[in-house]
Image (cartoon, rainbow, N blue to C red):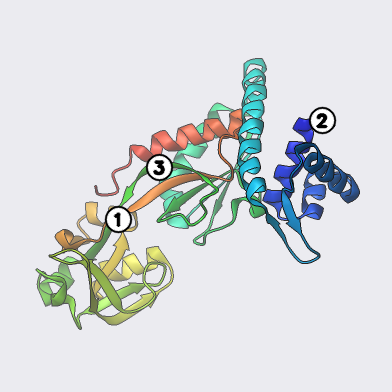
C-alpha cells in the first residue's frame, strides 16, 4: 500500500464529505476509494470513520489522524511547489472571493498588480456579499470581515474594521450632533440591511457591555453604496462599516459621530480552505493581498 496516496484519499474523503465526492475529485472509481480506506484502517489497526448509508463521521482517532495527514501532505506539497517555483514562472488559476464593495475598493488593485506581474497566472475575483464555502465553490482564497465560524480554515489576520455611525452635514444641522447613543432614539435613520437586520442599533456602554437604541427607519436598502448615498443626501443617520463610508467621510460628505461609543472593531482576515497547502501561485496572491490590506487605514 502507498501510505502517502492512502493519506491523500482519506483527507479527500473527510474534506469532500463522502466517498463518492472523493472519488470524483481524485478521478478514481468509488470501489477503489473504499478499498484504499479499508487498507489504511487495517494497517493502522483503528477505525477512522463511522459510516452508514446516510452519514459519515470521524472517530476520535480519525480526527487526530486527519490533522496529522493534512500536515504531512502540506509539507510534501510545499516541497514540490518550492521545486516547481524554482524551475519556471507562476502559472495557473487562482480564485479569490471578497465582499462586493470591499473587493472593488481594496482587493481589485492588488490582484491586477499581481496579474500584470505574472502573465501566465489566471486570476479570478468573485465579488459576493454572502459568505461562501471555499471548498464547495472551488475557491483558493477569501476575504472575510467579522468572526469566523469555520475553525478548519487557515486564517491570516490583516486588520480590524471599525463600525461607525455617520450623518451628513445637513442632517446634523437639522437634528444636532448626538453626544450619547440615547440621542438617536426616534431619529431618522438609513438602514443598511447588510449590517443590521432591524431598527435597533447597538453601542458600547459607558460601563462596558452593550446598549441598544431604537431608531426610526427613513430609508432602507440592501446595498451598501446606495445606503451610503442616501445617508449623504441627508435622509438620516447611518450605521456602517468604516470602509463603506471612508470616501464620503474623507470628502466631508459624511461625519462620524458617537465614536467613543463604537462597538469593538471586527477582524479582517484572509482565509484559505486548508492550512499550509499552498501552491506558489496562491502564496504569491496571498502575500500581495496581505501586504496591501495591512497598509489600509479604514479610518483607523
Quarter of the figure with the N terminus:
top right
Q: Is residue 229 above or below residue 71?
A: below
Mark nearest the camera among 1 and 3 is 3
Mark nearest the camera among 3 and 2 is 2
Q: Position of residue 18 (x, y in %)?
A: 75, 55
Mark nearest the camera among 1 and 2 is 2
Q: Tell me if mark 1 has few (under 14), some (14-19) or many (20+) residues whose alpha carbon lies within 10 angstroms of its own.
A: many
In terms of image quadrants, where is residue 12? top right
Q: Position of residue 270 (x, y in %)?
A: 47, 44
Q: Position of residue 280 (x, y in %)?
A: 60, 28
Distance from label 3 to label 2 (Cα)? 37 Å
Please tell me which of labels 1 and 3 falls first in the chain: 3
The residue tagged with tag 3: helix, strand or loop? strand
Whether residue 30 is visible here, answered yes or no, is: yes
Q: Is residue 229 above or below residue 113?
A: below
Q: Is residue 147 above or below residue 235?
A: above
Please tell me which of labels 3 and 2 falls first in the chain: 2
Q: Nearer the viewer, residue 186 or 264?
A: 264
Q: Tell me if mark 3 has few (under 14), some (14-19) or many (20+) residues whose alpha carbon lies within 10 angstroms of its own.
A: some
Please tell me which of labels 1 and 2 falls first in the chain: 2
Q: Which residue is pictured at 39% across the width and 64% down the height?
A: 224
| Image-based side of 18 in relation to 178, left or right | right
Furthest residue toward top? 87
Distance from label 1 to label 2 (Cα)? 52 Å
| Image-based side of 11 in relation to 221, left or right | right
The residue tagged with tag 1: helix, strand or loop? helix
Q: Which mark is residue 2?
A: 2
Q: Which mark is residue 242?
A: 1
Q: Which mark is residue 157?
A: 3
| Image-based side of 171 in relation to 119, left or right | left
In terms of image quadrants, where is residue 194? bottom left
Q: Which residue is pictured at 45% across the width and 52% down the height?
A: 144
Amino acid at each position: 500500500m502507498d501510505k502517502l496516496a492512502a493519506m491523500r484519499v482519506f483527507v479527500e474523503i473527510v474534506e469532500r464529505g463522502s466517498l463518492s465526492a472523493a472519488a470524483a475529485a481524485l478521478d478514481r472509481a468509488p470501489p477503489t476509494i473504499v478499498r484504499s480506506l479499508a487498507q489504511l484502517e487495517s494497517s493502522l489497526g483503528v477505525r477512522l470513520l463511522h459510516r452508514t448509508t446516510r452519514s459519515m463521521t470521524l472517530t476520535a482517532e480519525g480526527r487526530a489522524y486527519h490533522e496529522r495527514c493534512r500536515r504531512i501532505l502540506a509539507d510534501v506539497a510545499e516541497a514540490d511547489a518550492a521545486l516547481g517555483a524554482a524551475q519556471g514562472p507562476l502559472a495557473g488559476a487562482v480564485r479569490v472571493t471578497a465582499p462586493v464593495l470591499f473587493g472593488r475598493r481594496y482587493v481589485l488593485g492588488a490582484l491586477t498588480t499581481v496579474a500584470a506581474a505574472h502573465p501566465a497566472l489566471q486570476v479570478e475575483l468573485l465579488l459576493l456579499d454572502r459568505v461562501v464555502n471555499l471548498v464547495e465553490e472551488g475557491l483558493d482564497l477569501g476575504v472575510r470581515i467579522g468572526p469566523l465560524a469555520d475553525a478548519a480554515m487557515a486564517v491570516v489576520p490583516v486588520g480590524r474594521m471599525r463600525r461607525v455611525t455617520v450623518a451628513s452635514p445637513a442632517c446634523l444641522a437639522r437634528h444636532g450632533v448626538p453626544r450619547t447613543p440615547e440621542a438617536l432614539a426616534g431619529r431618522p435613520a438609513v438602514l443598511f440591511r447588510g449590517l443590521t437586520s432591524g431598527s435597533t442599533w447597538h453601542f458600547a456602554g459607558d460601563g462596558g457591555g452593550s446598549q441598544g437604541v431604537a431608531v426610526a427607519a427613513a430609508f432602507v436598502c440592501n446595498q451598501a453604496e446606495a445606503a451610503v448615498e442616501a445617508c449623504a443626501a441627508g435622509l438620516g443617520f447611518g450605521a456602517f462599516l468604516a470602509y463603506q463610508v471612508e470616501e464620503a467621510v474623507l470628502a466631508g460628505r459624511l461625519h462620524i459621530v458617537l465614536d467613543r461609543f463604537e462597538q469593538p472593531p471586527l477582524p479582517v482576515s484572509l482565509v484559505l480552505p486548508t492550512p499550509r497547502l499552498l501552491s506558489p501561485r496562491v502564496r504569491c496572491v496571498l502575500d500581495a493581498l496581505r501586504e496591501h490590506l495591512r497598509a489600509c487605514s479604514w479610518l483607523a
